[in-house]
Amino acid sequence: MNIQTNNMIRCKNCGRLIPSESSSCRYCGEELTNTSESKVSVSERNSTAKKRKKTAKFIVLGIFALFTIISVINTTDFKFSKLVKTEQTEAEKTEHSSITVREIDNPVVRNAPNKMRVKIIRITLTDNCTIVVCTVDNTQGAYSYIAIDPETYITLNESDMAVEKMIATDGISVSPQKTAIPKGKVVYFSLVFPPIDRDTRVLDLEESGENGWKFYGIQLK
């Protein structure tokens, strides 16, 4: 090895003293290692390695913290979303459960003098309205359009005092408007009236005018 004496070092090959900053021995040409520079280089490398380890440690901790925050946010969002959905579901159940519905399929009709090819296939009773679902048979191509008079009404229990006027339609126009119907088809439409007493036993449905649709004695019970 090279032996250092103050600013001089001894060549490991020939043993002579030469300046410490020399890269080779001036006497024998032996390449020399600068001990002080080596120490500085090693120190710098160690310092750099320590800094890198410290930086890597902070990066790992930062990533871990980030994932932790994201996990907490996702968990919170999931719990909040689940809570909102649960509350919505409960609200829907409450809303639906508060509305009672009763349906009478293919109700018996005592007399229908002007029904032509129109038939009542269902009556739906709810707390909000009374819906009369009908069909018009156009398989013979007898009609090109249908319409309903705006003054169409129902009477309850055959009493002239208990009258409910039609409030809406679906699938059929209110006169003077018209709804075209295809030939060879059976067309469905609905007439909507105000809600009626659940104890009502029988309905009459009448369309104004001499030739209007009329259904007497529609049995609900």
Image (spheres, rainbow, N blue to C red):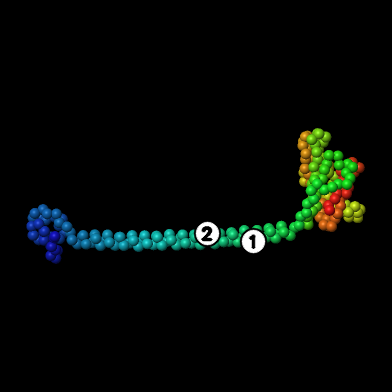
Separation (CA) of disc 2 from disc 1: 20 Å
Q: Give the residue at mark 1.
A: 87
- In the rendering, at what x and y percent does residue 39 appear? 21, 62
Residue in the foreground of this view, choosing between 108 and 65: 108
Is 133 displayed left or right of 34 in the figure? right
Q: Give the residue at mark 2.
A: 74
Answer yes or no: is residue 153 visible.
Answer: no
Residue for point 78% across, 54% down: 102
Q: Dot 1 lies on which element?
A: helix
> On the image, which quarter does residue 137 sit in?
top right
Residue type at the position of mark 1: Glu
- In the rendering, at what x and y percent does residue 10 appear? 11, 61
In this rendering, the answer to whether 103 lies above or below 172 is below
Q: Quadrant of the N terminus?
A: bottom left
Residue for point 78% across, 57% down: 127
Residue for point 86% across, 49% down: 218
Q: Nearer the viewer, mark 2 or mark 1?
A: 1
In this rendering, the answer to whether 155 lies above or below 9 is above
Residue in the foreground of this view, choosing between 161 and 180: 161
Answer yes or no: is residue 142 visible.
Answer: yes
Name the mark on residue 1.
none
> On the image, which quarter does residue 58 sit in?
bottom left
Residue for point 79% across, 48% down: 105
Is 62 displayed left or right of 163 in the figure? left
Q: Dot 2 lies on which element?
A: helix
Residue type at the position of mark 2: Asn
* Mark 2 vs 1: CB contact within 8 A: no
- In the rendering, at what x and y percent does residue 187 appear? 77, 40
Is 139 displayed left or right of 111 in the figure? left
**Sequence-first tag of 2 and 1:** 2
Residue in the foreground of this view, choosing between 212 and 156: 156
